[in-house]
Structure formats: structure tokens, C-alpha cells
């Protein structure tokens, strides 16, 4: 899968195991391998969707021989990588409705693509772009030190972020790590001044309905963080829901575990109702707009 700037991405296509009812692109979280979502992708294929999972540039199967000096940035994951994924699915499945499942940063990136108006429906889980004051209050200091002090310091030393050896997700290109570490309240301010109005217009071009899931025990993708991200999709019909681990008989779920296979008969089945039919299965858990 080739991007406009020549970078080649790698991933997997999961063909529907029954007559296809739509295409789904799964956007990973930062520093998470695409294979983390393979069980969910296989599940969706069994429900009649053609599913694409892929690694962003610098991650997993799309990692270059060396991350030092590669120059990859967070913004390119949306402007180039997700844009290429949209183009790929539109070529191989041009007549199908196109849906996006975005986890964490993966729910933010679609708005950076010039092709995002092609999306028919979006489902996001913990969609945010790591503005640290939005972290959960009880964990804010610890998360700030981890991602906004230690990460940029190690990135400066190594020329990339060695997250894997620390057990902190995957290694990250320096540009990606630093965009995360130094993100401000307004995301467009991380873009050159002459590009900011265009960035905002791309988000505003998204008109697909968005169902945004927030877990009550998610320290990163809090209600405030999700609301900040979703605010850029000004012309989309956005519905934000707040779920509790107890809703699925669990003590904890947090930012990552919704993609574990134990959710196959619960949360995953609920997501199909939204992706296939546009029905919000959590209508009793809505959060009022601020």
C-alpha cells in the first residue's frame, strides 16, 4: 500500500466470509501493532465486512531498517498513511460503504486525510491526541512524567523512542514521540501557520456519523480528551457514550482491552450494530455535549 510520498505500508486484508456488506479500516493506537487488532478484524470478517488492518510508518511491518533519522511524524499517519488506506479500500471495494474503527489516536487521524469525506460511518474508542491536562486527575502527574518528560528525554538521547525495551508500547520515530510529548490544547498549532486553516477544513469536511466510546476507567481517553478531539469534527453528527467495565461484567477495561477476544460476545457484537445498521447500542449511556 503506497502513500503519496512514496512510503510503502504493510498490513492485512480480511475478506468477508459472507457476501460483503461494507469495508472497515482499523486505525491502531500510537505504538500498537496492527496485529493487536487481528482477532477483532477476523471477527468483523465473519460478520460480513472486508477489513483492512495496517501498521503506520515506523511501526511493525511498516518499520524501516533504522528509526534514527527517518523523520516520520504523527501527522503523516493521517495525512499520508490513513489517506493511503482509504484510497486502497476505495480501489479494491469501490462500491461498498466504508467504515472506520479508530482506537486512541486512530480516531483523530481520519480528519487529517483529504479523502475523509469518503467515510460513511466511524466508531472510535478512546479517541484523543494526548493533551496532558486531559489525563485522569488521579494519574495525571504519573502520565505526564512518563510521556512528556521521560519519553522526550530518551528520544533525544537515542534518536527515537525505545519504548519496546521499556515495555511501553512499540518503539516510535522521534517525530511521532515529540508530537505526542509536546502537543498543546489546539492540535492545529503543531502544523505550520500556513497549513492550519487547511487542516481545520479537512476535519470539517467529515460528515460521517461518529459514535465515540469512552471507558470510565480510561486514564488517557477521558471524557475531556474525547470531547476535545471530537470538537474538530464540526460537521459530523457526533455521539459520545460513557461505558463502565461493570456493563460487561468486568472490574477493569481501561484504554486498551476492548480489543481483547473476551469481548467477542459483548462489546464486539455491540459494535456490529453500529457499523452494519447505524444503531447506537449504548443509547442509555450518552454524554451531553458541553
Image (spheres, rainbow, N blue to C red):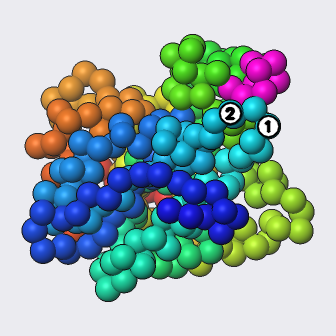
- Residue 216: x, y in percent? 38, 34
SS state under label 2:
loop
Boundaries of the magenta span: 154-161
**As drawn, 185 above or below 218:** below
SS state under label 1:
loop
Residue that appears at 54% across and 28% down: 170
**As drawn, 108 above or below 263:** below
Residue 240 painted magenta = no
Spot the residue most to the front: 65
Residue 31 in view: yes
- Residue 257: x, y in percent? 32, 32
- Numbered label attached to residue 69: 1
- Residue 264: x, y in percent? 16, 42
Q: Quadrant of residue 286?
A: bottom left
Q: Is residue 130 left or right of residue 25?
A: right
Q: Nearer the viewer, residue 285 or 265?
A: 265
Residue 270 in view: no
Query: Mark 2 — residue?
Result: 66
Residue that appears at 76% across and 58% down: 188
**As drawn, 52 above or below 194:** above
Q: Nearer the viewer, residue 125 or 95?
A: 95
Mark 2: few/some/many CA within 10 Å (<14, 14-19, 20+): few
Mark 1: few/some/many CA within 10 Å (<14, 14-19, 20+): few
Q: Main secondary structure of the magenta part?
A: helix
- Numbered label attached to residue 170: none
Residue that appears at 32% across and 85% down: 95
Q: Is residue 65 left or right of residue 17?
A: right
User: CA separation, marks 1 and 2?
Assistant: 8 Å
Is there a contact, CB below 8 Å, between mark 1 and mark 2?
A: yes
Spot the residue most to the right: 193
User: How many tags in the picture?
Assistant: 2
Amino acid at each position: 500500500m503506497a502513500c503519496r510520498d512514496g512510503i510503502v505500508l504493510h498490513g492485512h486484508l480480511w475478506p468477508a466470509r459472507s457476501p460483503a456488506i461494507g469495508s472497515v479500516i482499523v486505525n491502531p493506537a500510537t505504538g500498537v501493532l496492527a496485529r493487536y487488532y487481528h482477532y477483532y478484524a477476523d471477527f468483523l470478517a465473519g460478520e460480513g465486512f472486508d477489513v483492512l488492518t495496517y501498521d503506520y510508518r515506523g511501526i511493525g511491518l511498516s518499520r524501516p531498517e533504522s528509526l534514527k533519522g527517518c523523520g516520520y511524524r504523527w501527522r503523516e499517519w493521517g495525512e499520508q498513511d490513513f489517506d493511503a488506506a482509504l484510497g486502497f479500500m476505495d480501489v479494491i471495494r469501490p462500491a461498498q460503504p466504508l467504515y472506520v474503527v479508530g482506537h486512541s489516536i486512530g480516531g483523530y487521524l481520519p480528519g487529517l486525510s483529504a479523502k475523509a469525506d469518503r467515510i460513511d460511518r466511524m466508531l472510535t474508542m478512546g479517541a484523543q491526541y494526548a493533551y496532558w491536562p486531559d489525563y485522569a486527575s488521579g494519574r495525571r502527574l504519573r502520565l505526564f512524567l512518563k510521556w512528556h518528560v521521560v519519553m522526550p528525554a530518551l528520544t533525544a538521547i537515542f534518536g527515537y523512542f525505545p519504548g519496546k525495551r521499556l515495555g511501553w508500547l512499540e518503539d516510535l520515530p522521534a517525530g511521532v514521540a515529540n508530537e505526542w510529548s509536546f502537543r498543546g490544547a489546539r492540535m492545529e498549532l503543531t502544523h505550520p501557520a500556513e497549513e492550519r486553516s487547511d487542516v481545520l477544513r479537512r476535519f470539517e469536511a467529515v460528515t460521517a456519523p461518529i459514535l465515540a466510546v469512552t471507558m470510565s476507567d480510561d486514564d488517557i481517553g477521558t471524557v475531556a480528551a474525547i470531547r476535545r478531539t471530537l470538537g474538530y469534527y464540526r460537521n459530523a453528527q457526533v455521539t459520545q457514550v460513557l461505558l463502565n467495565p461493570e456493563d460487561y461484567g468486568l472490574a477493569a477495561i481501561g484504554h486498551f482491552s476492548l480489543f481483547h477476544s473476551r469481548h467477542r460476545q459483548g462489546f464486539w457484537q455491540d459494535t456490529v450494530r453500529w457499523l452494519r445498521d447505524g444503531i447506537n447500542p449504548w443509547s442509555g449511556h450518552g454524554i451531553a455535549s458541553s
